[in-house]
Image: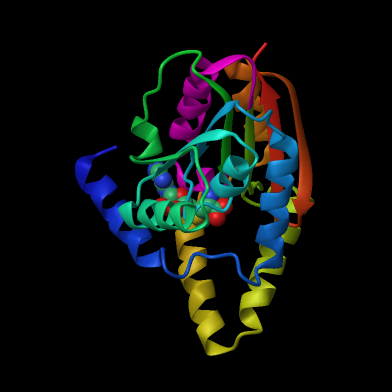
Amino acid sequence: MAFSAARAQRRAWDRRAGSWEHGGAQNLTKVVDAVLEAAAPAPGSSAVDLGAGTGQVTLPLARTGVRVIAVDVSPEMISRLEAKALQDGVDGVEGMVAPIEQLRLPAGSVDLVVSNYTLHHLRDPDKEALVHSVFEWLRPGGRLVIGDMMFGRGTSGRDRAIIGSKLAVLAKRGPAGWWRIMKNVFRFALRMRERPVSAQRWTGYFEKAGLVDVTYKEVVAEAAVMVGTKP
Ligand SMILES: C[S@@+](CC[C@H](N)C(=O)[O-])C[C@H]1O[C@@H](n2cnc3c(N)ncnc32)[C@H](O)[C@@H]1O
């Protein structure tokens, strides 16, 4: 990723850090819960959370005795996450500020890699390359668990239903919502920032990287949780 793109991305997420909390966002909470349920790591194991934000997945994992490296491009997100861990007396969390596209970890060093609502921001080749890297970082038997919006660009009935319901929610908000629709349609058309792909595409990335027992579960309309294991 070019240096200026990474800097712009960091600034954009730093600005959103204060508002990025799940309070009241019931659907996001459901996806976090599904990720945690699928992850179910053993106490004492090690995990990496990609795009950890302010700790929605990292902190519950660490509370169960898992050592977590929380990676995020935004220093502000990581500093909030670390402050929460300190305040709540949660041990075993290591914050790391880095774009996940450039993350390098030792081969065979982790039991679990999780990511929630982050990977749809990556370009498709970066998604695929990341899954290959994760395969290297995992120990045999280790798992990759991704919770994210998973839908394609309108070729299936499910895609069209999801896109239609997102637009309907925004349209109900009046002029502010119509403005968001225009911005979102523009971003979606040009694949700026929001670049979800379908669960079928994710399954392909997982299997091509060598992960086995690949399964996914739809959690809420737009989001699914996908799991794969390193043999
Ligand atoms: C929508 S938030 C999700 C945060 C958290 N995982 C959760 O479930 O609430 C996306 C997070 O990914 C981070 N992020 C986005 N693109 C990233 C990248 N390329 N590398 C590292 N972090 C990234 C953002 O800074 C933000 O904290």
Q: How many marks?
A: 0
Q: How is the image coloured?
A: rainbow
Against 100, residue 152 (above or below) is: below
Considering every residue shown, the one lying at the far front of the view is 89
Against 76, residue 40 (above or below) is: above
Residue toward you, 120 or 89: 89
Relative to 76, 157 lies left or right: right
Relative to 47, 157 lies left or right: right
Q: What is the span of residues highlighted in magenta in the rendered image?
A: 116-143
Residue at left offset 49%, top offset 34% = 127
Residue at left offset 76%, top offset 36% = 216
Residue at left offset 61%, top offset 70% = 23
Residue 135 seen in the current view: yes
Residue 191 seen in the current view: no
Considering every residue shown, the one lying at the far left of the view is 4
Q: Position of residue 54 (x, y in %)?
A: 47, 56
Question: For the C terminus, which image quadrant?
Answer: top right
Against 156, residue 163 (above or below) is: below
Q: Position of residue 104 (x, y in %)?
A: 36, 24
Question: For the N terminus, which image quadrant?
Answer: top left
Locate residue 178: give its quadrant: bottom right
Q: Which secondary structure dominates the residues rendered in magenta?
A: helix
Q: Position of residue 22 (x, y in %)?
A: 59, 65
Residue toward you, 63 or 212: 63
Q: Position of residue 84 (x, y in %)?
A: 47, 57
Residue at left offset 20%, top offset 47% = 4
Tell me if residue 156 is in the magenta stretch.
Answer: no
